[in-house]
Image (cartoon, helix red, strand yellow):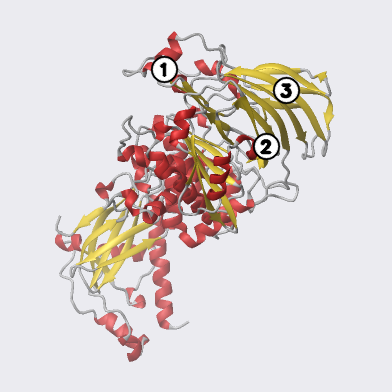
Amino acid sequence: MSIRYAFFSVFLVLFGLSGMAQEAENQGSQTSADQTLNIFSKMTREFATPNQFRTASGSPGPAYYQNEADYKMDIKLDDRNQRLTGRETITYHNNSPDALEFLWVQLDQNMRAPDAPAKDKDGSGLPPVVPAGSLVANYMDQSYEGGFNITEVSTGGKSLPYFINNTMMRVDLPEPLQAGESFSFDIAWWYNINNYILDGGRSGYEYFEEDGNYLYVMAQFFPRMAVYDDVEGWQTRQFWGDAEWALPFGDYEVSITVPADHVLEATGDLQNRNQVYSRKMMRRFEEAKDSYDQPVIIVTQQEAEEAEKSFSCKTKTWQFKAERVRDFAFATSRKFILDMMAVKVGEKDVMAVSLYPKEGNPLWEEFSTKVVAHTLQSYSEKTFDYPYSKAVSVHADRQGMEYPMICWNHGRPNPDGTYSDAVKFGMISVIMHEIGHNFFPMVVNNDEREWGWMDEGLNAFLQYHSEQEFGQKYPEVIQGLSQYPSRRGEPASITRYMAGDPQYIAPIMSNPENIFQLGNNAYGKPAAGLTILRETIMGPEAFDFAFKTYARRWMFKHPTPEDFFRTMEDASGVELDWFWRGWFYRTGYVDLGVREVQQVFFTEEPTPAGEALLERFNISDPGELDALFVVTQDELSDGQVGQVPTQLPRLSQFLEENFNAQERAAMNQPQYFYEVTFERLGEMPMPLIVEYTYSDGSTQRKKYPVQIWRMGNETVSKIVASDKEITKVVVDPDLETADVDLGNNTWNLRS
């Protein structure tokens, strides 16, 4: 070993041991209840053991399975009495290795039954402001009786025994359904459709008093199979209203009978278009299939206004087929305007569709279908090509809800047609979000009943990117703003929530029914976290590949959170246990700052601190190391040491003895050394992004890896060697890390 390397090896050991001692003194900054577990530890305690169904890499295992449910339905809508009647044949395919003694069916409309426990799940104290509709629906109008009325459950003409427990119905089988077998049974039902404007809900009708018409957005309108899988067996959580759905994939054949003057859209491909479309509509539809730049109006506003007056006593039956979907929904009204355009996704054309009453114009005619088309292309680039033939945006006041190929969206102008930027951007954003749900969870089919963030958070993240791209594509829409005004996605957007009252904050890994601030918890924080992952921790190249890998691995399958976490690491090579644990399993916030900046000098004369350190590690002769002693500006100011010499003969001699002239000439010649001490006041660690400003006005960015906090240390110091004086230090200059307190992020030389 050469002298020069012996010198550096000894000093690495010396200062390494000194650093470890300092870090040990600063341990104990964890604020989680589980302080015995370092945030950087592997997630073995939180994650399930990999198995034949789900692997350690995050991909489906060799024995992965999922059961399927196919539906054949006949639906009738009574527009005069707001009642829906239906009959369905469900064919359930048991692809699991287990024999099933019974089947579980979801009856979500039962949360509206007169005696539904969901009505009493929350406290009923009155806030200072009460919407009139809420007051009437909850305390005055007792005429509405909701909930499913099941009139038949049978197979082969014979009744099947069943048991209803609130929103779940158990169907008892004549004999166990063996692995690989299928079972068909029939259910008949009816229910009174709710007025969602008055009493809320994700579906129902809106009544227009001025013309006496109804607009229906219909979902959860049929008994639906629950999921049976390798994680929970049957998912039998009750539907309480916040946590959404766990549903198996299947094929649908649905006939929907409505008044003859209604215009209708639904999940799936319309099978009898020639019978339910007029000749004008058919001609315009053919034009729309070749229009890629502008929507083609299939039903005009004038035609819709004429239909509002008709109230036909005749009916039409619309027939739809859909393959590999997890649900079915439809919208119908005689008030609807209809427009469409084609959008190229991969190698195929997809129809972007909008359905809206005159109350939505001019806003909807101008923007809706273009937003649908943009969203399909934006999301497809980041995940997988959109697999279905169409995507439909339906205008429904106060709504924002998603189903396969169709969704409800708010955004209603004033009666005179004017609208604010808030209404415009709110409409564009909700359409992007709900259309985006076609990817998560309609294709990447997570269990919404258990993990709301898995689709809402991932979707909100992709929505943020889609919004920014939309603003760049259509600068006239943002009217001179520097960028689209996204509500969620930026790290800074979540800091107020993370710094809030801890008793109203739950970990992201919480059930949606047990969260005070669902929007921040399941949408905002995951979206901001994924932005931080992409832009600051992993980098776009590594993140984008891993995210797309997850989406494609779990297309038309049922992933869990662990499948997502494991895939992101597996496909990127980035260790992220600390991030999953801190951001998703805990509630700690980010607060990094600059504690101190000290200029340091070197002397050959022993200092008290230097001698103590050498003695601690049994180094008796400083000359053996050609030792230089460090003196800080504070120590000089306090007179703890004498004046520091400007010449260091020992250093010059060491350089001459160990480096040739060419090597010495190539060396950096710093005039200034600074010890910059950073602090971590919050539990959540983050990479340390620092901007140094020098006396000549130049700046330098430095990104220190998150591992600098791996010992649980509250402070860390870095030496900056420069030929220029440092005048300013800023932590997180571009607000990339969701830092909740910017007051400690800046140090100025003369402040």
Tag of residue 134: 1
The residue located at (37%, 48%) in the rendering is 490
Q: Which amino acid does label 2 sit on?
A: Pro
Reading the chain from its start, which is encountered first: label 2 or label 3?
A: 3
Tag of residue 187: 3
User: How crowded is the residue under tag 2: few (<14 C-alpha within 10 Å), some, or many (20+)?
Assistant: many
Q: How far apart are marks 3 and 1 (CA)?
A: 33 Å
Residue beneath disc 2: 248
Residue 267 in sight in this render: yes
Pointers 3 and 1 in contact (CB under 8 A)?
no
The residue located at (33%, 77%) in the rendering is 626
Q: How far apart are marks 2 and 1 (CA)?
A: 34 Å
Reading the chain from its start, which is encountered first: label 3 or label 1?
A: 1
Residue 36 in sight in this render: no
Pointers 2 and 3 in contact (CB under 8 A)?
no
Percent coordinates x, y for residue 231 in the rendering: 67, 38
The one of 308 and 348 positioned closer to us in this rendering: 308
